[in-house]
Amino acid sequence: MRNNVANSVEKSINYQMKLLYAFGMLFIVANHCGKGGISFFYEFFQPYSFHVPLFVFCSGYFYSSKVEATPWKYMRKKMGSLIVPLYVWNFVYALIAQLLSLQGFSIGVSAGINFQTLLIGPITPRLYFDYNLAGWFVVPLFLTQMLTVFSRRFLSAIIKKEHRREILYYLFSYALGMLGIFLASKGYRTGWQLLFTRSLFFVPFFCTGFLYAQVLEKHDTLSNFWYFFFLFSTTLSLIVYHGQPLAYQIALSDYNSFSIWPIIVGLLGIAFWLRIARILAPSIGRDRCVTLVADGSFSIMLHHLLGFMIVKAICAAVAHNTVFFQDFDWNAYYNDLWYFYCPKGLEQTRIVYIFIGMAFGVAIDVIVKACKGSLTRWIKQNKKKSVFVYGAICLLICMVCGGGAWLIANRG
C-alpha cells in the first residue's frame, strides 16, 4: 500500500518543471555575481531578458482554474505565501543591515529605519535594506496572480463558451503586457509606476505558462533537432536584423521603444531552457539538489545576496590574517554590495559565489520549513490558541527586528 502511494506521488511530480525552476534560480544567482564565471548560451539568450519571466511562466504553469471559484481564498493564500514572508524578512534585514553597520558597513542603512522603509518599502518597487533587494519580484508576481484570477472570474461570468473565454483571456493578457512596455517606453518607470509596468509585463508570461500546461504541452512533440533548429534560426534572425542580441533589464523596465520584442525575447529564452529541462529531467531531474533548489527558489531569491556577503567575509578574513588576497578592496567591501573579490582576477572563481549564495538560501528554506512544520503540528493540536500564538510570533519577530534595528540606528 505504501509503495503504491509513493509511486503515485512520484508520478505526480513534474521533474521537468522542477529542473526548469532550478535552472532559472541558477541563472539569476549567477548574473547577480557578474555571470558567475559561466556562460549559459548568453551569445543567443541575453542575461536578465528571460530569467524572471521564466519564473512567472512556471507560476502560470501550476495555476489551477479551480481557484477561480474562490478568488478571495486564493488571494489570502498567496498573501500568506508571498507578502507575509516578504514583510517578515524585511524586518529581519533591517536588523541585519544595522548590525553590520556597527562593523563599518554602509550597505542598506542610508534610508534609515522608519515607517516608509519598514512598512511601505516591501510593496514599493524598492526594498531599502539592499541585502534583500532581489525580492522586488514578489509584489509584481502577486499582482499578476490576482489580476489573473479576478479577470478570469469576470470573463467566466460573461462568456459561457470556454474556448472563446480562453482566447479572449490570452489576447487580454498580451494586451496588458504591451501596455506595460508602452508605459515604460514613455518614461513611466520610476517610483510606483515601475511596480505597475513590471506587473503588466509579467501577465503574458503567466498566461503563456497556463496555456502551455492546458493546451500546448501535449502538442510539444517536435524532435529535438527541429525544435532547436527553428528556435536558433528565429533567434539568429532577430540578432542579424537588429545587429546585436536584444537585451532587457526587466527589473528596470528599460524598454526604450514600444515593441513586442521584449516579450518575444523572453519567450525564446524560456522555450530554449524548457526543452533543455525536458532532455535532462530523466537523468538529473530527480536529484535531491535539484529538488532543494526548485522548492527553495523563493528563499534563494531573497537571501542569496547575503550569501555572497559570507563569501566576501571569508575572503576578508583571509586577506586580514594571511599573506593571501592582499589586493582585496576593503573600501568596496564595506560600501558596495556589488563588489566581488576574485583571486588573481580570475572570473571563474565567481562560481564560489553561486554555490554559497544558493546553499545559503536553501539552508534558510530548510530551517524555516522545519520550524513551520513543528508549528503547524502544534496548531492542529491546539486550534483555539493557534491564531493568537501564530500572530504573536509574527508580531514578536517584527517588533524584535524592527525595534532592534531602530535602536541601533538611533544609538547616537
Image (spheres, rainbow, N blue to C red):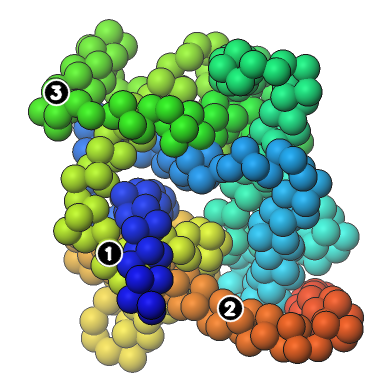
As shown in the figure, which amino acid type bears the numbered disc 1? Arg
Q: CA distance from mark 2 to mark 3?
A: 44 Å
Residue at (25% x, 16% y) in the render? 234
Q: Is residue 312 left or right of residue 75?
A: left
Place residue 400 in its image quadrant: bottom right
For marks 3 and 1 on the same chain, the one whose residue lies earlier in the sequence: 3
The residue that disc 1 covers is: 286
Q: Look at the numbered disc 3 and give the secondary structure of its residue.
A: helix
Q: CA distance from mark 1 to mark 2?
A: 23 Å
How packed mark 1 is, by other alpha carbons closer than 10 Å (few <14, some 14-19, many 20 or more), is some
Residue at (36% x, 39% y) in the render? 47
For marks 2 and 3 on the same chain, the one whose residue lies earlier in the sequence: 3
Q: Is residue 148 left or right of residue 117?
A: left
Place residue 119 in its image quadrant: bottom right
Q: Is residue 62 above or below residue 340?
A: above
As shown in the figure, which amino acid type bears the numbered disc 3? Trp
Tag in front: 1 or 2 = 1
The label shown at residue 368 is 2
In the image, 78 versus 72, the foreground residue is: 72
Residue at (32% x, 85% y) in the render? 318
Q: Look at the numbered disc 1 and give the secondary structure of its residue.
A: loop
The answer to whether marks 2 and 3 mark residues whose Cβ atoms lie closer than 8 Å is no
Q: Quadrant of the C terminus?
A: bottom right
How packed mark 2 is, by other alpha carbons closer than 10 Å (few <14, some 14-19, many 20 or more), is few
The answer to whether marks 1 and 2 mark residues whose Cβ atoms lie closer than 8 Å is no
Q: Is residue 112 above or below residue 19?
A: below
In the image, 407 versus 285, the foreground residue is: 285
Determine if residue 186 is in view.
yes
Q: Is residue 66 left or right of residue 174?
A: right
Tag in front: 2 or 3 = 3
The residue that disc 3 covers is: 226
Q: Look at the numbered disc 2 and give the secondary structure of its residue.
A: helix
